[in-house]
Image: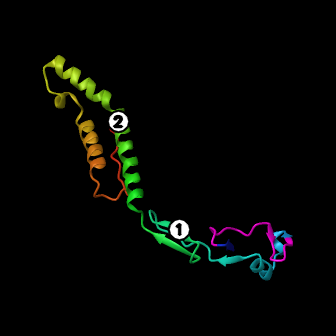
Amino acid sequence: MIYSKNGSYPTKIPNRIILSNGMTRTDSTTFTEQEISDAEYIKVDNSPAVDYPNKLEWDGENLQWIIREPNEEEIAYQWNNIRERCEQLLSETDYKVTKAIELAYINGTTVDQELEPNYVTYRQELRDLCNNVNNDPWNVVWPTKPI
């Protein structure tokens, strides 16, 4: 069982409580419901299960759990993380593009002819992923890097 004191985030009852008369009680296994109430702790239901990416918050004023969807700031943060990961994955394959540019120059061909098609597709999928903000940022399907 978890408890809240003065609207604080619910947690297990501490091992030491102070009663209204100033006396201290220790050993939470021996506290009575009356002592817990006298120390101004309120029994709270355990937190409900929350489906990701929803957020669970405690409303200390109304002493209740609140489940909410991610706000704009959290969504923007998630998209920023995705963009950073895309940039990292793209930079990890930049050497392939550089090599293709060099080979195209040497061979008198185009970069597309020198770059392996799997890498062209992979890199485009990464760019599409980080630019498509209409998707759900919590259910991203990352493209597979070619071998």
Q: Is residue 11 magenta?
A: yes
Q: Quadrant of the N terminus?
A: bottom right
Q: Quadrant of residue 48?
A: bottom right
Check disc 1 and report its element: helix, strand or loop.
Answer: strand
3 and 109: which one is in front?
Answer: 3
Q: What residue does disc 2 label?
A: 147
**In the picture provided, is 97 more to the left or to the right than 65?**
left
Q: CA–CA distance between discs 2 and 1?
A: 44 Å
Question: Which residue sits at x=47%, y=67%?
Answer: 51
76 and 133: which one is in front?
Answer: 76
**In the picture provided, is 100 more to the left or to the right than 17?**
left
Question: Which residue sits at x=56%, y=78%?
Answer: 62
> Is residue 31 shown above or below 99?
below
24 and 138: which one is in front?
Answer: 24
- Mark 2 vs mark 1, foreground winner is 1
**In the picture provided, is 19 more to the left or to the right than 98?**
right
Magenta part of the chain: 7-24
Q: Is residue 88 magenta?
A: no
Q: Is residue 138 visible?
A: no
The label shown at residue 117 is none
Question: Which residue sits at x=59%, y=76%?
Answer: 63
Cβ atoms at labels 2 and 1 below 8 Å apart: no
Q: What residue does disc 1 label?
A: 57
Whole-percent x, y for residue 38 in the image: 77, 79
